[in-house]
Image (cartoon, helix red, strand yellow):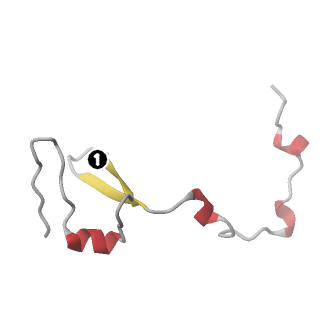
Amino acid sequence: MSEATVTSKGQITIPVDIRQSLGLQAQDRVTFTPMPDGTVVLRAKTKSILDLRGLLQPTPDSVVSVDDMGLGSR
């Protein structure tokens, strides 16, 4: 288990083993998500939305026209 101390400015240094396991580099961002049971989940925000490009392959039946989407029909 890793441990860090909060400074008087509210800052912490993420331990090296945690940074390595998350693949964190300088200037990467992390999110803290409080859970109902009192735990906090730390997530690395090392991916860009652009990294998702090509993740899903289109299928022949996946083409939908704008009219079928219902866009503009308010």
Residue at point 65% right, 69% down? Answer: 55
Extreme residue in the front direction: 26
Residue at point 9% right, 42% down? Answer: 8
Q: Amino acid at mark 1?
A: Met
Front residue of this view, candidates 34 and 10: 10
Left or right of 74? Residue 42 is left
Front residue of this view, candidates 36 and 48: 48
* Screen quadrant of the N terminus: bottom left
Residue 26 in percent (x, y) is at 34, 63
Residue 56 in percent (x, y) is at 69, 68
Q: How many numbered marks are there? A: 1
Residue 32 in percent (x, y) is at 31, 49
Left or right of 25? Residue 48 is right
Dividing the picture into quarters, in which one does residue 54 lie?
bottom right
Residue at point 78% right, 68% down? Answer: 58
Left or right of 41? Residue 69 is right
Residue at point 84% right, 29% down? Answer: 73
Q: Secondary structure at mark 1?
A: loop
* Screen quadrant of the C terminus: top right
Front residue of this view, candidates 37 and 54: 54
For label 1, count other residues whose C-alpha is less than 10 Å away and answer few (under 14), some (14-19) or many (20+): few
**Residue position for label 1:** 35
Extreme residue in the top direction: 74
| 66 to 24, vertically: above or below | above
Dividing the picture into quarters, in which one does residue 52 lie?
bottom right
